[in-house]
Image: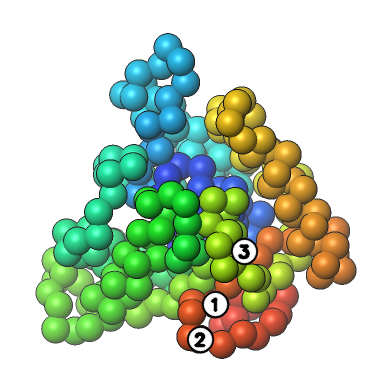
Amino acid sequence: MHLVALGAHCGDVELQVGAIAHKYAKAGHKVTFVHLTAGEKGNPPGVSVEEYTKQKIDESEKAAKVLGVETITLDYKDAELEFNDEIVTRVATLMRKLKPNVILTHWENSMHSDHELCPRIVQAAQLKAALPGFDLEGLPPHYFGYFHSENWEDMEGYVPDIFIDVSEEFDTYLEAISQYWFVMNSKSFRYYDYYKALGTVRGAVSRVKYAQTLKYPTGLGVRRGQSIPGFDL
């Protein structure tokens, strides 16, 4: 089976579901990270946007290697994402090519406009990829489900539905996210400390050492389990 994690910027899905991704990759499933942008506008002092674009993509490839997953970065611009037919069609076409069973993406509420657009794009692409009336490069229709994952910038209304035990994968997860300069060096937010603590807290409430969480799309109900529904290990 194929699990795709789709985020706004290089680093988002690694932080949100990196340990989950590693768990499923270890179990033999194909896992792909798709970044809509590099997240290049947070460039460090003395580093140009162009240089940081390359750096972020390089970091994403290093993190993917640690986790045992594949990674793709599209060429949209950080903080400039728009919801339109062009991006929906492009993502739908990519999903017909990748044929994921499940996509993990941002929660629908966020302080970051790029993050907030991701689930809207995924939802629209889900319909367009599945409907046979759309001719997308001659590719056959493909349907996928999707879930939301946890990001510190996307917490308005986020209440986890699924707690996945990632105790055995967490050290590798920490190694993977540490490949990112911003995770280890940001002056505005302590990413590494936060996500290590978050894994601890989510693990404590689900009675394991470390956990990462997912949320059903609004309106699909709440069910609890130790794996992605329909995508068991």
Circle nearer the N terminus (3, 1):
3
Q: CA distance from mark 3 to mark 2?
A: 23 Å
Task: Name the residue rendered at 61%, 75% in the picture.
Answer: 228
Dot 2 amino acid type? Leu
Task: Name the residue rendered at 64%, 39% in the picture.
Answer: 191
Q: Nearer the viewer, residue 231 or 48?
A: 48
Marks 3/2 in contact by CB < 8 Å: the verdict is: no
Question: Mark number for residue 220?
Answer: 2
**Residue 195: image x %, image y %?**
69, 47
Marks 2/1 in contact by CB < 8 Å: the verdict is: yes
Q: Nearer the viewer, residue 218 or 66?
A: 218
Dot 1 amino acid type? Tyr
Circle nearer the N terminus (3, 2):
3
Dot 3 amino acid type? Tyr
Q: Is residue 179 visible?
A: no
Q: Which residue is disc 3 drawn over?
A: 24
Q: CA distance from mark 3 to mark 1?
A: 19 Å
- Secondary structure of the residue carrying tag 2 is loop
Q: Relative to residue 136, is residue 145 depicted above or below?
A: below
Task: Name the residue rendered at 77%, 48% in the picture.
Answer: 197
Q: Residue furthest top?
A: 46
Q: Nearer the viewer, residue 113 or 46?
A: 113
Q: Quadrant of residue 214?
A: bottom right
Marks 3/1 in contact by CB < 8 Å: the verdict is: no
Q: Nearer the viewer, residue 181 or 179?
A: 181
